[in-house]
Image (tube, grey):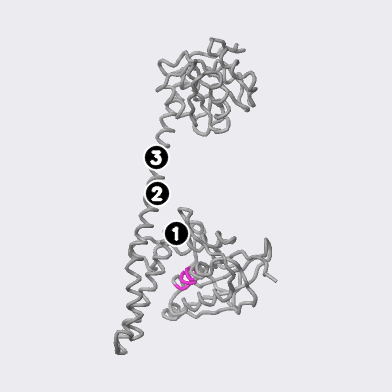
Amino acid sequence: MARILHIEDDAKNRLLVRKLLQSAGHEVIDAEGGIEGIRLARERTPDLVLVDVRMPDLDGYEVTLRLRGITGLEGVPIVAITAEGDRETSLAVGADGFLEKPIDARKFARQIERFIGGHKERRERRESAPLRVASQRIVERLERKVLELSDANAQLEEMARLRREFLRNLSHELATPMTPIVGYLRLLLDEELGPITPMQRKSLESVRSSTERLRGLIETLLDVSSIETGKMHLYHRRYDFGAVAARAIDQTRPRMEARSIELFVEPAPAGLEARGDPDKVRRAMVHILDNAAKFSPEGGQVAVGIERVEGGAGGGFELRVVDDGPGVPAELEAKVFQAFYQADGSVRRVHGGVGLGLAFARQVAEALGGGVTLHAPPRHEVAGCRLGGTEVVLRVGAEPTER
């Protein structure tokens, strides 16, 4: 019985080779890539190595060169097995044999046993020994670099996982005390706990406004965390896109009035029936409208249009928002959709927020068969206004109206 190391990134090929060789009484060690294969060769000292030529980290030629340069493995037979590799190149870098895919299951075990017994394919050209040594040194350095990059990537993935967990835990911790705060505010404003003075009501209304803003941010953090982990729950029910847009506009209107921004709204056509999650669509719209208000100058203008679009299965619906702010530089247009990205991230920045709005809006829209696009300056006239800031378009898909 021989110990055979099989280096192959395709799981189906690994399984086939394992079955054929184990049936012939051999021990098979699997490696999913070149780096892992080199490590296992050092640790297990196989009697033969089968190596695929096409692999994502180190290819079969590089693996063969590296194995030939490791003390104790110089004489181990190596057989290249691939559908795309070159026989002469495989033999030149140090392989003892070359088998083409798809392998012949009836002959495969006998072919391997010949190489275990000392058979070697003849090379048509003799390679230069100094060239082989130089190549081995190059591959050794390449192996070290690949390992460094693999370790760095693993660390980045771990950091991303910890960030997602932190966001999820933080969001839940913040959401828990919000429930009694909102509940008691409602009781106070409804005077369920006793009468309040006009000044007290004004103060409580201010607190409620800030609380609603904080709750919206917490909900967005929860949603972004859920989307990143692939566990965001979306409802799919019938709703009126125009009615949802009207609620989003009403929700953001006070913030625009507070900055003396003039709001122009194009009347929405009737019958904009869609299927999806109206609550998340509304919140996505609110983020886009809030951005327009936030980046427009004091006393500026914002225009909103709602329309049906054709194409695809049932077409879709769009909310188009334009402002007369400074616009988004072309080099930043893609970045503003990244979660937590802000063009000005300093603590002294003029505009508030944490950079989640557009990221959340795009993720929700894409989950519902649409997307979010941005143009600066705007490409369209909306509600009779030709503004020079930024145009953001949210689109969701829609199924055909039931009859």
- Give the x, y percent position of residue 97: 58, 16
Element marked by disc 1: helix
Q: Position of residue 325 (x, y in %)?
A: 48, 71
Q: Nearer the viewer, residue 196 or 122?
A: 196
Across and down, in percent, residue 253 comes to: 47, 79
Judging from the image, what secondary structure is the residue with disc 3 in?
Answer: helix
- In the rendered image, residue 20, in percent from the top left (x then y), is placed at 58, 23
Contact between labelled residues 1 and 3, with CB atoms less than 8 Å apart? no
Nearer the N terminus, badge 3 or badge 2? Answer: 3
Q: Main secondary structure of the magenta part?
A: helix
Look at the numbered disc 2 and give the secondary structure of its residue.
helix
Label 2 CA crowd tier, 10 Å (few <14, some 14–19, many 20+)? some
Q: Of circles 3 and 2, which is in front?
A: 2
303 or 23: which is nearer to us?
23
Region of the chain picked out in magenta, as a range? 286-293
Q: Nearer the viewer, mark 3 or mark 1?
A: 1
Q: Which residue is mark 3?
A: 152
Nearest the viewer among 178 and 286 is 178
Can you say whether 317 is above or below 227 in the image?
A: below
Alpha carbons under labels 3 and 2: distance apart? 14 Å
3 or 1: tag closer to the N-terminus: 3
Task: State the residue position of label 1.
Answer: 224
Q: Quadrant of the C terminus?
A: bottom right
In the depicted structure, whether residue 46 falls above or below residue 59: above
Query: Disc 1 residue type?
Result: Val
Marks 3 and 1, how far apart in space? 25 Å
Q: Residue furthest top?
A: 118
Q: Residue at x 45, y 53 (%)?
A: 229
